Amino acid sequence: MTTRAAARKPPGESRRKSPGPPLTLAIDVGGTGLKAAILDEHGEMVADRVRIETPQPCPPKVLIASLGHLIARLPAYDRVSVGFPGVVRKGRTLTAHNLGPEEWPGFDLEGALTKKLGKPVQVINDADMQGLAAIRGDGVELVITLGTGVGSGLFEDGRLAPHLEIAHHPFRQGETYEEQMGNEALQAVGRKRWSKRVERAIQTLRVLTTFDCLYLGGGNAAKIEFELPPDVEVVSNALGLRGGIWLWRQRQLALGRG
């Protein structure tokens, strides 16, 4: 029987049955869905991932409460990685175009979740987190996610570059990449026309970044209807969560812990 004292503990607070490498709670905040899973030291899920719909609108307090309900269904964990759909700097959110409310710019999401969960937390852009799991660490690698919106992450020899909000940069016909290739555009113009836009975007981004490899992720990447060039590949959307383990590995390397 669960006691009241146990029920008041933050999600994931219960003790693990045996010592071992730290387990990571990975959270993927999307414009339409909130997903979470527990990862082992190899980035493998130790239990089935959980998902709920993203509340609309979704101000910070609503998101934090929703994540609390979501991860209460998961086993215990030691640390937390969060992929957020906007620009994040030192744990603070600067933009959140697909979540709506004006409270997001400057919000300390990392600090708020650390207080809520009682565990160390890292928050980065969601495409950057997916990219950490997708890249090979050799040369210039670009990650583009195609979902509710359009995300991007740029890496050189495995190092994450300062985040570029490519989604909201002008693309064609006076519209941004997200306006031309986000989910609303896909639903409006259909897969054939949308795919042509994605193909043109790849050509433009090749000129912009001179990438060695481009990875296409997100739920809509599988809907592309053209043959990809050899240096472009579609990657699993599950990498949006699996990148959570690599985020902590990067911190360990930065601290000289190998």
Image (cartoon, grey):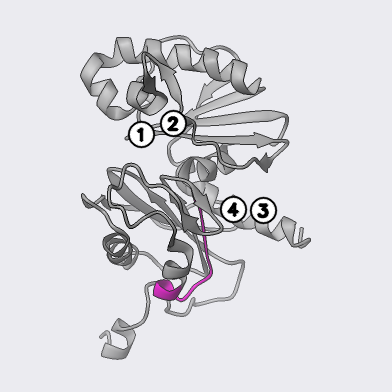
User: Mark 2 and mark 4 in contact (Cβ < 8 Å)?
Assistant: no
User: Mark 2 and mark 1 in contact (Cβ < 8 Å)?
Assistant: yes
Instruction: Single out the mark in the foreground, 1 or 4.
Output: 1
Q: In the image, which residues are magenta?
A: 115-124
Q: Which residue type does callout 4 highlight?
A: Leu
225 falls in the magenta region: no
| Residue that appears at 38% across and 17% down | 224
User: Mark 4 and mark 3 in contact (Cβ < 8 Å)?
Assistant: yes
| Foreground of the two, 192 or 175 | 175
Horizontal and vertical percent position of residue 133: 57, 42
Instruction: Single out the mark in the foreground, 2 or 3.
Output: 2
From what the image shows, is residue 176 above or below residue 99? above
Whole-angstrom CA distance, mark 1 to mark 2, is 8 Å
Of mark 1 and mark 2, the one earlier in the sequence is 1
| Foreground of the two, 165 or 228 | 165
Q: Name the residue under label 1.
A: 149
Whole-angstrom CA distance, mark 4 to mark 2, is 22 Å
Q: What element carries label 4?
A: helix
| In the displayed structure image, the side of residue 21 where residue 122 appears, left or right | left
Q: Name the residue under label 2.
A: 167
Q: Residues within 10 Å of mark 1 (few under 14, many from 20)?
A: many
Of mark 1 and mark 4, the one earlier in the sequence is 1
| Residue that appears at 65% across and 55% down | 249
122 falls in the magenta region: yes
Q: Which residue type does callout 1 highlight?
A: Gly
